[in-house]
């Protein structure tokens, strides 16, 4: 680690002020190097209090991405997760795919404060401004086939909702398949991408990308009517850590379908009039249920019951 990282580590593990001279002595560097490191950390967003004759102290409300902080919040699986934090990336999913190609292990986690080319479902862009949201992707290397992978998306939605509810008291809802809504506004999108071995039918990897609007206010015109934010004071590191902990727990207990009950409870789809695309045409219907595969059961108003397991839907009204 360089001097800046070493200084940050010292501050993170101290509950009191540390003098610049003590830091310099412990790290075997000059006082000037300590001063330079402190200023660099402040520019990155760390809230460091400086008091003459007392030294430096990291204020607890600093919310700069930290692999150490995130790891401490992944309570049950911290030693298994390899975390990389970035100020800006093009796309966390794209970067993680590149890292997979270079041989990174399962449970590699990419976390960013901003995406310049964030991606959503069906080729859409995911608006990912700096400082007001959190964007991250997790690599899985499952030993099951593609037919079972649909569970991963619904598990992820439950993992996100559980973390938001536990940490903030907010009651989120799931718009099928995996958009998270609060107060009828989309606050989180989930993009699941996979690579398949066509001969065996097994998955090479699954990359789960999650983007959460925490305090974003100004959205582009094309999404301003549907996008919203959590609008709460929550640590990004804590939120990411809790979501990843929840998700890995469900993934490691893949045969346990108890999450489906939660998915249904979080769902906002029951009795909603929707439009949906099937075989290239647009249809309308009323949602009557979600089955145990988290598929949408729809009455098409023509005497038919339709099962939707993928695709894009629109809710006519909330």
Image (cartoon, grey):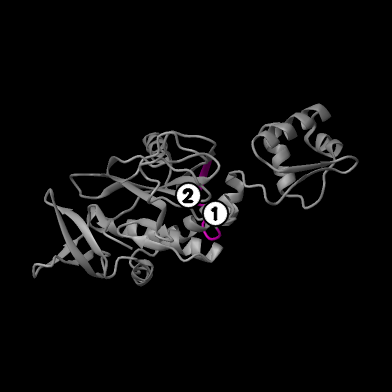
The mark that comes first in sequence, 1 or 2, is 1
- Is residue 215 shown left or right of residue 60? left
- Is residue 137 shown left or right of residue 67? left
Say above or below: 168 vs 229. Answer: below
Q: Position of residue 250 (x, y in %)?
A: 40, 63
Question: Principal SS element in the magenta part?
Answer: loop
Foreground residue among 99 and 264: 264
Name the residue tied to disc 2: 213
Foreground residue among 103 and 162: 162
Q: In which quadrant will I find the C terminus?
A: bottom left
Magenta residue span: 75-84
Residue 145 visible within the image: no
Q: Position of residue 28 (x, y in %)?
A: 80, 32
Q: In which quadrant will I find the N terminus?
A: top right
Q: Position of residue 139 (x, y in %)?
A: 40, 47
Name the residue tied to disc 1: 78
Residue 82 visible within the image: yes
> Residue at coordinates 81% horizontally, 51% vertically from top-left?
16
Label total for image? 2
Q: Secondary structure at mark 1?
A: loop
Mark 1 neighbour class, 10 Å CA radius: few under 14, some 14 to 19, many 20 or more: some
> Residue at coordinates 36% horizontally, 35% vertically from top-left?
101
- Is residue 301 shown left or right of residue 184? left
Residue 81 within the segment the image draws in magenta? yes
Q: CA distance from mark 1 to mark 2?
A: 25 Å
Q: Residue furthest left?
A: 303
Foreground residue among 240 and 167: 167
Q: Position of residue 251 (x, y in %)?
A: 39, 59
Say above or below: 271 vs 241. Answer: below
Mark 2 neighbour class, 10 Å CA radius: few under 14, some 14 to 19, many 20 or more: many
């Amino acid at each position: 680690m360089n001097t800046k990282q070493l200084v940050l580590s010292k501050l993170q593990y101290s509950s009191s002020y540390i003098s610049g001279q003590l830091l310099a002595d412990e790290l075997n560097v000059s006082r000037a190097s300590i001063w330079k490191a402190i200023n660099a950390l402040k520019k990155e967003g760390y809230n460091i209090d400086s008091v003459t004759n007392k030294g430096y102290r990291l204020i607890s409300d600093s919310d700069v991405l930290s692999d150490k902080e995130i790891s401490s919040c992944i309570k049950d699986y911290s030693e298994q997760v390899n975390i990389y934090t970035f100020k800006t990336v093009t796309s966390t999913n794209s970067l993680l795919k590149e890292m997979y190609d270079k041989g990174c292990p399962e449970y590699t986690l990419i976390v960013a404060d901003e995406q310049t080319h964030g991606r959503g479902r069906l080729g859409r862009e995911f608006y990912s401004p700096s400082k007001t949201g959190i964007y991250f992707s997790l690599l899985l290397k499952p030993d099951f086939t593609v037919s079972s992978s649909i569970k991963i998306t619904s598990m992820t939605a439950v993992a996100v909702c559980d973390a938001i509810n536990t940490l903030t008291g907010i009651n989120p809802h799931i718009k099928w398949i995996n958009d998270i809504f609060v107060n009828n506004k989309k606050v989180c999108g989930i993009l699941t991408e996979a690579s398949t071995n066509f001969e065996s039918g097994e998955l090479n990897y699954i990359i789960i990308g999650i983007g959460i609007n925490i305090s974003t206010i100004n959205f582009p015109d094309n999404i301003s009517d549907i996008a919203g934010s959590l609008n709460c004071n929550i640590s990004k590191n804590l939120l990411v850590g809790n979501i990843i902990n929840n998700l890995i727990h469900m993934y490691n207990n893949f045969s346990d379908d108890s999450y489906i009950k939660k998915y249904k409870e979080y769902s906002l789809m029951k009795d909603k009039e929707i439009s949906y695309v099937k075989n290239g045409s647009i249809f309308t219907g009323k949602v009557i249920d979600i089955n145990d595969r988290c598929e949408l059961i729809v009455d098409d108003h023509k005497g038919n019951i339709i099962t939707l397991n993928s695709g894009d839907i629109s809710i006519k009204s909330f």
